[in-house]
Amino acid sequence: MDEKTLIAKRVALELKDGDLVNLGIGLPTLVARYVPAGRHVFFQSENGIVGMSGPITGAENHDLTDAGGSPISALPGAASFDSALSFGLIRGGHLDVTVLGGLQVDREGRLANWMVPGKMVPGMGGAMDLVTGARRVIVAMQHSAKGEAKIVGRCGLPLTSVRRVDLVVTDLAVIEPTDAGLVLKETAPGVTVEQVIANTGCELIIAPDLRSMPIEG
């Protein structure tokens, strides 16, 4: 199983029946593929749709896209609307969960994911609104990039929001930001606590009930 699939599968286990869920651009869009059987989740995209799925073979519609511009399918009962209504849902606190990618998360659970200074920014998107407005924020990202930890003592990149995110799921671990600090709740299959610590740029609190991710290959 590749790293992105592992992350997406673990995030999908966090979604509850009836949740209204926004999926960010990139890795988070994979989560829709792995919702457990029998669990009904409504996926929203900030460009104006509720009731989307990934492209279904034979039912792709290139006039319908997710926030990243990739084609999607609309499930029976789906609704489309303009950006004003879409952001009304987001800013009004109606989203149960948003799943976003991340560039960095710091020891206080603050997320940086919208720009790298000096590089082209195609647009701010809805990240700031989503982190502020969703009831629960899950960050789905790789634990490190190019040998550098992405979970750090203090974000060196511009913050998306000062709000603390609720959960961070990486290819190595599941980490919960709390008042006391970052709590290591789970390790990925075959990954040791020592490996997680070695690839993290700040102190972790080891949960007394630490377990391996409940992921089946």
Image (cartoon, rainbow, N blue to C red):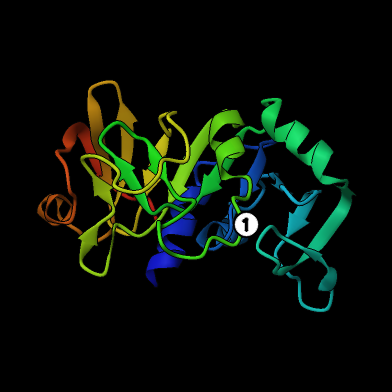
Residue at the extreme bottom of the image, as rendered: 58
User: Relative to the observer, which residue lies in front, 139 or 32?
Assistant: 139
Q: Is residue 64 above or below residue 133?
A: below
Above or below — where is 140 with respect to 87?
below
| Location of residue 36 in the rendering, given as x and y in whole percent from the top left corner | 58, 51
Q: Is residue 46 above or below residue 176?
A: below
Q: Amino acid at mark 1?
A: Ala
Q: Is residue 216 visible?
A: no
Mark 1 is surrounded, within 10 Å at the Cα level, by few (under 14), some (14 to 19) or many (20 or more) other residues, namely many
Which residue sits at x=63%, y=53%? 37
Residue ID at (84%, 71%): 61
Where does the image place residue 88, in percent across and percent down from the top left? 77, 32
Can residue 196 be seen in this snapshot?
A: yes
Whether residue 111 sits left or right of residue 44 in the image: it is left
Q: Quadrant of residue 129?
A: top right
Residue 155: where, in percent of width, then height? 30, 43
The reply, left or right, for residue 38 in relation to residue 146 is right
Q: To which quarter of the image does residue 109 belong?
A: top left
Number of residue marks:
1
The image shows residue 158 at horizontal and vertical percentages of 40, 45
The C terminus lies in quadrant: bottom left
Question: Quick one: which residue is furthest to the front in this view?
Answer: 118
Q: Work out which quarter of the rendered image holds the N terminus and state it.
A: bottom left
Residue at left offset 31%, top offset 26%:
178
Examine the rendered structure and indicate whether residue 203 appears above or below residue 77: above
The residue pinned by badge 1 equals 32
Mark 1 falls on what kind of element? helix
Residue located at (16% from left, 36% from top):
206
| Relative depth, front residue between 122 and 191 | 122
